[in-house]
Image: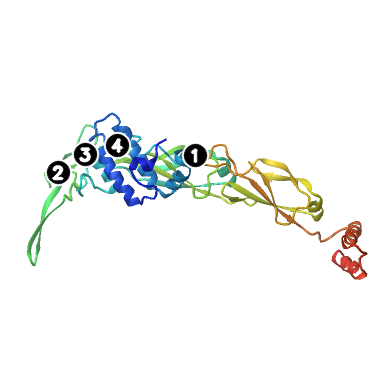
Amino acid sequence: MSDYYEILGVERNATKEEIKSAFRKMARKWHPDVNKSPEAETKFKELGKAYETLMDDDKRATYDRFGEDGLRNAGFNTQGPFAGGFGDLDEVFNSFFGGFGFGGSRRQDPNAPQRGDDLRLDIELDFEEAVFGLTKEIKIDHLESCQSCKGTGTKEGSKPVTCKTCGGSGRIQQTTKTVLGHFTQIVTCPHCHGKGTVIEDPCPDCHGEGRINVEKKIELKIPAGVDNGSKMRLSHEGDAGLNGGVSGDLYIVIHVKPSMYYKRDGINVFTKLDITPAQAVLGDRVTIKTLDGEREVSIPAGIQHGEVVKIKGAGIPSLSKQGVRGEHIVVVGIITPVKISNEEKALYQKLYEIQAGRKAKESVKERIKGVFK
């Protein structure tokens, strides 16, 4: 299995700046537009996966502990940002770093493909839903490429025309008069916004935008064992890109309602069980509620207040280890009875005498009667 740190050529404690620097260097080496070797495309996609994982704190922590399988089990997408294709090298640098290509900053071409925006959706789950996972239908509003104009923004049969203001260059010369004289600079054309063309006959469906807002239903498979704050990423389910750019991603943030019965700690769950002194002394078998239904457990004789009984494999499924579940930990509390029968009083008195090795004094008898009136 590939080592993401080895792919980027960085140490395991590398900072984000070191990872960025390494990705820039390796991207220039392996981008298929530059490197024509047969393995270039595969290498470049691996670089994208490694960079995306190590730049995300949550994904990096999961990867460091459990590797790529752990990422998949935790619900993260492991295909990488270039699974659906990639643009030229400058487009890659514009998308990842805001525009640092072959050695210097440059004006971003407004006609170049631009990646769509990422979106976030928060969903709430019941405790048991988070434990066992489920398939849930979600609805999102996002921008999709207009099908009528294929994203061009122009009405069918027409096309953009050259901007008359800038003559198609996308920039104009602007002169400003100051106390020091005339100051001339090149600025983005205010009419075409740097594109060099304008749409005179816009698409009636998207009004020239090239994208339309659409409500979409998605069947979301939530893995068993997700916790409050868990995140999932759905690749290319965000807003559509511009000029043929790839769509952004949809990030799902999960919020889990607390349970009134269970307390969760990692993959373990805790519950409380109150028993009588007799059960504590003699031991017993009792039925308790577990995540899998009612279950009979054995309380060992002589158990003390606050001690626990563990049920292995009855806790939360592990996201990182397939088929592994935590423990159900039962915290035992011993409850002293307040009201008892005359027969029970006599038995407690006899027990006292046995344990003390002598008959109960009258004062003790009276105190017992006073407690159990």
Q: Position of residue 215 (x, y in %)?
A: 41, 40
Q: Which mark is residue 86?
A: 4
- Give SS at disc 4: loop
The type of residue carrying mark 3 is Asp
Q: Position of residue 238 (x, y in %)?
A: 37, 42
Tell me the residue at 35%/37% (across/down).
46
> Label 2: how many residues lie within 10 Å, few (<14), some (14-19) or many (20+)?
many
Mark 2, residue position: 163
The type of residue carrying mark 2 is Cys
- Give SS at disc 1: helix
Mark 1, residue position: 73
Q: CA separation, marks 1 and 2?
A: 52 Å
Mark 2 or mark 3: whose residue is earlier in sequence: 2
Q: Position of residue 29 (x, y in %)?
A: 25, 39
Tell me the residue at 86%/59% (across/down).
340
Mark 3, residue position: 201
Q: CA separation, marks 4 and 1?
A: 26 Å
Q: Is the Cβ of the residue at disc 1 closer than 8 Å to that at disc 3? A: no
Q: Position of residue 254 (x, y in %)?
A: 49, 47
Farthest residue toward the bottom? 363
Image quadrant holding the C terminus, namely bottom right
Mark 4 or mark 3: whose residue is earlier in sequence: 4
Residue 240 falls in image quadrant: top left
- Give SS at disc 3: loop
Mark 1 or mark 2: whose residue is earlier in sequence: 1
The type of residue carrying mark 4 is Phe
- Of 170 and 221, which appears nearest the observer? 221
Residue 277 falls in image quadrant: bottom right
Q: CA separation, marks 4 and 2?
A: 30 Å
